[in-house]
Image (cartoon, rainbow, N blue to C red):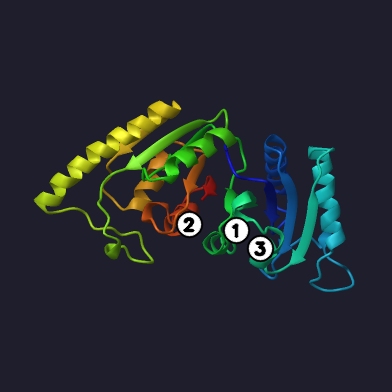
C-alpha cells in the first residue's frame, strides 16, 4: 500500500489564500481517489472575515451560506465534476475535525499554518497533516530520519504522493540519546564523553551509515549522513534553509525525540516552507 488515505479534508479557518489551498485538496483527492470534504471553522475572535461573509442583521455572526457559496464557486472553477461535502461551523476547530473524521489513520488534513490552532491539532490528534505556508509545487523534499522502523514507510509515502519531486534523506548521527536527559519542553540531549561510549558510538555510527546508504540505493534517492555540532532543531533548520528545500516530510512518533511533535512544531514555527506529517 502506497499510502493509507481514504479521505481528504481541507481545513480552513479564514478565506485567505483559499483557492490555492482548495486546489491542493482537489488535486490530491483526484489523483488518489479519496473522499473530499471541506471543513470551514471560523474561530472568534482569532480571525477577521470580510463583511460579505457576515450577517448584516447580527453583529459578529457568520453568514454560512455566503461562505458555502464562495467555496462552491471556487471548487466549481477548479474541478467542475468533483464530488465533495462542505461543513461550516463557528469555533472549536479540534472538536469539529474529530466529529467529521472518525478514522484518523485513513484521513489526510490539508490546512494552512495558523500558529494559534495548528500546534494543538498536531499535538492532540493522530491525523496526517499537510500544512501549507506557501502552497506551491515542490522541487526538493527533505525527509529527516532516525533510521527506525517507520523510515521505509515514510519514503514510500513521499515518493508516491510527491511523484516527480526530488526526495532527499538526511540522518544526523551525533548522540546516543539517554531519554532521561531530554527535557520535556526543550530539545536537549547529552553528548557522548567517555572513551567507552565514544568507541561504541563509532561502531553504531558505521552500522547506521551502511543502513542509510542501503536506503538510498534501494529507493534510488539522494541523501546525506551528517554529524552537526549544535542543537538538533537549530541544525535541522539551518540545513533545510541552506539546501533550499520546499517541503519537509516527517513521520511523527512522540516516543522518539527525533520524530516528536516537540521537534516538528519547533521546525514549523521557524521555517517558511510547507510540511507533510504522517504516522
Does the residue at mark 1 contact the one at mark 2 (Cβ under 8 Å)? no
The label on residue 98 is 3
> Seen from this angle, which residue lies furthest left?
195
User: Disc 3 or disc 1, which is closer to the eye?
Assistant: 3
The image position of residue 132, as x and y in percent, is 60, 48
Q: Nearer the viewer, residue 157 or 140?
A: 157
In the image, is 30 to the left or to the right of 66? left
Label 1 CA crowd tier, 10 Å (few <14, some 14–19, many 20+): some
Whole-Å distance between the Cαs marked 1 and 2? 12 Å
In the image, is 140 to the left or to the right of 225? right
- Indicate which disc, 1 or 2, sits on the residue closer to the N terminus: 1
- Indicate which disc, 3 or 2, sits on the residue closer to the N terminus: 3
**Residue designated by label 1:** 114
Q: Is residue 41 above or below residue 226?
A: below
Residue at the spot 69% in from the left edge and 44% down from the top edge: 25
Under tag 2, what secondary structure? helix
- Indicate which disc, 3 or 1, sits on the residue closer to the N terminus: 3
User: Disc 3 or disc 2, which is closer to the eye?
Assistant: 3
The image position of residue 19, as x and y in percent, is 73, 45
The label on residue 265 is 2
Locate the N terminus and report the quarter of the image it occupies.
top right
Residue at the spot 57% in from the left edge and 34% down from the top edge: 160
Label 3 CA crowd tier, 10 Å (few <14, some 14–19, many 20+): some
Quarter occupied by residue 179: bottom left
The image position of residue 34, as x and y in percent, is 71, 43
Amino acid at each position: 500500500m502506497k499510502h493509507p488515505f481514504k479521505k481528504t479534508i481541507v481545513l480552513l479557518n479564514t478565506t485567505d489564500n483559499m483557492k490555492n489551498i482548495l486546489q491542493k485538496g482537489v488535486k490530491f483527492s483526484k489523483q488518489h481517489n479519496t473522499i473530499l470534504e471541506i471543513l470551514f471553522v471560523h474561530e472568534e475572535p482569532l480571525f477577521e472575515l470580510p463583511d460579505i461573509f457576515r450577517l448584516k442583521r447580527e453583529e459578529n455572526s457568520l453568514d454560512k451560506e455566503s461562505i458555502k457559496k464562495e467555496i462552491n464557486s471556487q471548487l466549481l472553477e477548479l474541478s467542475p465534476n468533483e464530488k465533495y461535502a462542505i461543513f461550516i461551523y463557528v469555533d472549536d476547530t479540534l472538536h469539529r475535525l474529530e466529529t467529521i473524521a472518525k478514522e484518523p489513520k485513513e484521513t489526510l488534513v490539508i490546512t494552512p499554518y495558523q500558529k494559534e490552532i495548528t500546534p494543538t491539532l498536531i499535538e492532540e490528534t493522530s491525523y496526517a497533516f499537510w500544512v501549507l505556508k506557501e502552497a506551491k509545487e515542490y522541487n526538493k523534499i527533505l525527509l529527516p530520519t532516525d533510521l527506525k522502523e517507520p523510515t521505509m514507510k515514510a519514503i514510500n509515502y513521499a515518493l508516491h504522493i510527491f511523484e516527480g519531486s526530488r526526495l532527499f534523506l538526511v540522518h544526523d548521527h551525533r548522540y546516543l540519546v539517554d531519554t532521561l536527559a531530554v527535557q520535556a519542553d526543550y530539545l536537549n540531549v547529552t553528548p557522548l564523553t567517555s572513551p567507552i561510549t565514544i568507541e561504541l558510538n563509532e561502531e553504531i555510527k558505521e552500522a547506521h551509515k551502511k543502513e542509510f546508504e542501503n536506503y538510498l540505493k534501494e529507493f534510488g534517492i539522494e541523501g546525506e549522513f551528517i554529524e552537526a555540532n549544535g542543537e538538533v532543531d537549530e541544525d535541522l533548520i539551518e540545513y533545510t534553509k541552506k539546501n533550499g528545500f520546499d517541503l519537509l516530510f516527517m513521520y511523527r512518533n512522540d516516543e522518539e525525540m527525533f520524530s516528536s511533535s516537540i521537534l516538528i512544531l519547533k521546525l514549523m514555527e521557524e521555517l517558511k516552507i510547507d510540511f507533510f506529517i504522517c504516522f
